[in-house]
Image (tube, helix red, strand yellow):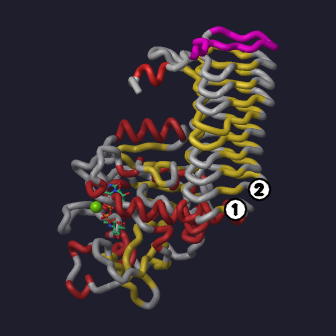
Amino acid sequence: MSLSIVILAAGKGTRMKSNLPKVLHKISGKAMLFHIIEESLKLTNEITIVLSHKFDLVKEQIEANYPNLKIVKQDLQNYPGTGGALKGLEFKSNKVLILNGDMPLVTANSLEKLTQSSADIAMTILELNNPTGYGRVVIKDGFAKEIVEEKDATTAQKAIKSVNAGVYCFNSDILNKFIPKLDNNNAQKEYYLTDTIKMAVDEGLKIEPIVVDEDEFMGVNSKVHLSIADEFMQNRIKQKHMENGVIMRNPKSIYIDCQANFIGECELENGVCIEGDCTIENSKIRAYSVIEDSQIKNCSIGPMAHIRPKSKLIDTHIGNFVEVKKSTLNGVKAGHLSYMGDSEIDEGTNIGAGVITCNYDGKNKYQTKIGKNVFVGSDSQLVAPVTLEDNTMVAAGSTVTDSVPSGALVISRVKQKIVNGFFNKFFKK
Ligand code: UD1
Ligand code: MG
């Protein structure tokens, strides 16, 4: 059986109240549309995405991430609606799966079940206590007979609680035959894909209604929906990592993007946030630390540390209120209140409290290189570009502007002066 997939993503997404096209809003660190593209790619490479609203922007984003998908533009002006989205397309595969770009929770597993139906059309049904807004599905003798959109429904039809989730698997000749015949003779003056159901029934074809769960097939139309879908996704992500051996303290308070990887034995305390493409191996991340697009191996981080993108930390201890950005730290201790940006720091080195790499002069960024066994005293500023060679010491409170040769101590602070009796003289006691 050959399969192609069409993802409908041309709608305006008005209820999202955002300038960003709805399908580009993120769930657990990835655009909703990309979640569904990735699940689709597990089933076939024959994927067409229908766009229209902010066409260029969405197309550019898709092509940057998935170069081999077919992208078409719907003529929303003349052919609005889910049926209009398919006008002009021709399907050569045996089956066509129709998906929505705003359904980020759907899994390939569930989609595969739809494709295995022996009926001419398999469609998804949600059983809802509150069916408002959805198309109602008339089911008789176990088969779907008709889908009635809410705006076209009679009072009796509105009471139906079996609703159309909006995902279908068609034998492609059915689409090729019926899409050109759709009209817009309805309350919304749209071309409804759902009208193909009645047309198929009239020709004696069978439509299998497959009941699906909201935690996979919910559509995201507003920012409230976005937060609900994200919570479903978070639970899924965290459960997977915990099953693979990650310890989480109060998992509800932890946020982990879908790209994160954990290896070996890791522990996350409450309030930890892991964003973007992170790999964390045999490490403990303490409460309220944020880690972004970084690699961490055999480390202890936090509490309240911020590891920013492109950092690579190995055998390192990072304490509270420490920020690291685009730096490689190997065998380092930075226990308190410091900033390491655009730096490379080697084994056995201790970064004292309040040490700052001054990596930015207001125009450009510069590198700080710190070798092995360096002791950087508290409250020092390392003005980049600067190198501290192996086995060097920086006296507390120094401003280091020139590189320090191996074995040396650098001290750059005003010599301490004692003025005896000054206090009493000054306050005339
Ligand atoms: C559609 C179904 C409805 C179902 C609901 C489930 C029709 C006529 N109705 O409702 O029975 O209960 O989905 O969510 O199909 N889209 C386009 N082009 C358009 C219009 C929509 O590509 O012209 C895309 C949207 O971007 C979205 C998807 O189709 O991804 C569904 O659109 P939406 O407007 O949410 O669905 P409804 O038409 O309200
Ligand atoms: Mg609509």
29 is higher (above) or lower (below) than 175: above
User: Quadrant of the rendered structure where residue 190 is?
Assistant: bottom left
428 is higher (above) or lower (below) than 5: above
Q: Amino acid at mark 2?
A: Glu
Q: Is 274 left, or right, of 388 in this rendering?
A: left
User: For mark 1, what is the residue?
Assistant: 247
x and y percentages locating residue 159 in the rendered image: 28, 86
Observer-nearest of 83 and 294? 294
x and y percentages locating residue 389 in the rendered image: 76, 15
The residues colored magenta run 402-418
Q: Amino acid at mark 1?
A: Ile
Q: Is 153 left, or right, of 289 in this rendering?
A: left
Q: How many marks?
A: 2
Q: Is residue 80 visible?
A: yes
62 is higher (above) or lower (below) than 416: below
- For the stretch drawn in magenta, what is the main secondary structure? loop
Secondary element under disc 1, as helix, strand or loop, is strand
- Quarter of the figure that contains the N terminus: bottom right
Q: Is 226 left, or right, of 263 in this rendering?
A: left
Label 2 vs 1, first from the N-terminus: 1
Secondary element under disc 2, as helix, strand or loop, is loop
x and y percentages locating residue 191 in the rendered image: 27, 61
Residue 409 on the magenta segment: yes
54 is higher (above) or lower (below) than 368: below
On residue 265, which mark appears?
Answer: 2
Observer-nearest of 372 and 95? 372
- Quarter of the figure that contains the C terminus: top left
- The image quadrant where one finds ligand 1 is bottom left
Q: Are marks 2 and 1 in contact (CB under 8 Å)?
A: yes
Q: What residue lies at 28% left-to-right and 47% top-to-bottom?
A: 75
